[in-house]
Amino acid sequence: MRKSGIFILGAALSFAFTFGGYGVIHASADEKMVYVGGMSAGFTLKTGGAQVIGTCEVIGENGTACPAQDAGLRAGDCIYKVAGIKVDSIQELNEIVNKSQGKTLEFEVGRGSETFSVKIRPIKDKTTERYKIGVLIRDSVSGIGTVTYIDKTNGRFGSLGHSVTSENKQEMQISDGTVYECSIVGVCKGVRGRAGELRGMFLNDKELGSAEKLCDCGIFGKISADFEVDELMSIVASSETVKPGNACIYSTVNGISPKKYDIEIVKVDKHNKENKNYVIRITDDELISETGGIVQGMSGSPIIQDGKLVGAVTHVFLNDPTRGYGIDIQTMLKE
């Protein structure tokens, strides 16, 4: 459920809606009260450096070459410093490299959990007359996601339920990011063998909060102080009593308003090491008609059973888009 460049996260963040038939739920001392999500949001996440997405040839006076590739740089690497200077953007990297005038520079590079240094000598490009090392770079990524919950005590949110990976399948790291309201404007339906996806539009004038952490449980951050949560439904977040059987999800597959859709929790595995704690099946005819089942962009849709938030949708089965995995809400709350 990931795409390079523009990645599809999940569905949902803020908006008023009610749960049919649950009434007011009170939490015990060891349970957490949250606002339930299910609404689409747009995420713009900074990579914390200049991330390499590919290499290319530089046409110099002596022919073509790729200094970055020759030095061992590859897709997924993140350039943190050049000549001791911190790099946060593509523009900063280009300026430092060009000012080198062809002198060898030392690059501090991150690859997964490791950091190392390499020396690269830029080449003067005959076309632009600027010095280059032959890399394709990005300093941020954007996509659609679903916020699962907002913590009533501190205004922090959890979303997505799984990690975001780069082209080389490594888990991405972020320094910070911004969350916007998002409107779903179209759906590519899922079919056997191909995952569908939600198509959304960022509402950049409506900032919902900040994204501060990306891990294997999703994206976490802080809701803006200006964002209205008073009309959102409060619910207990607890999976202690979760069991196979009927449940529902809240998701946004059109516009900005989440809707309730029926599902079945087919299997419960609290100890799954990949956070695939539930196998779920979409049973709602309306949702199947609109999307084919679970599609990219629904990740993070909250799973409700017996009036409690028990988890979030994370993955779809490619051989059956009406089925997928969910993560235990307790795992997300720990983050």
Image (spheres, rainbow, N blue to C red):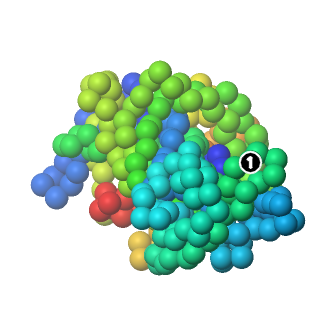
Image point 64% across, 69% down: which residue? 121
- Quadrant of the frame with the N terminus: bottom right
Reply above or below: 45 against 335. Answer: above
Residue 78 placed where, x, y %? 54, 64
Image point 49% across, 78% down: which residue? 116
Q: Callout 1, which amino acid? A: Glu
Q: Residue furthest top?
A: 205
Res 36 → quadrant: top left
Reply above or below: 280 against 233. Answer: below
In the image, taking residue 157 as reference, residue 256 lies left or right, namely right
- Circle count: 1
Please give the residue where the numbered disc 1 appears in the rendered image: 129
Depth check, front residue: 197 or 59 = 59
Res 153 → quadrant: top left
Image point 60% across, 66% down: which residue? 103
Residue 318 placed where, x, y %? 74, 61
Res 64 → quadrant: bottom right
Residue 156 placed where, x, y %? 29, 45
Crowding at dot 1, Cα within 10 Å, few <14 / some 14-19 / many 20+, comes out as few
In the image, taking residue 185 as reference, residue 159 lies left or right, namely left
Q: Residue furthest left?
A: 29
Depth check, front residue: 323 or 133 = 133
Residue 101 placed where, x, y %? 62, 57
- Quadrant of the frame with the C terminus: bottom left
Look at the image and tell me whether residue 113 can be seen: yes
Identify the secondary structure beneath mark 1.
loop
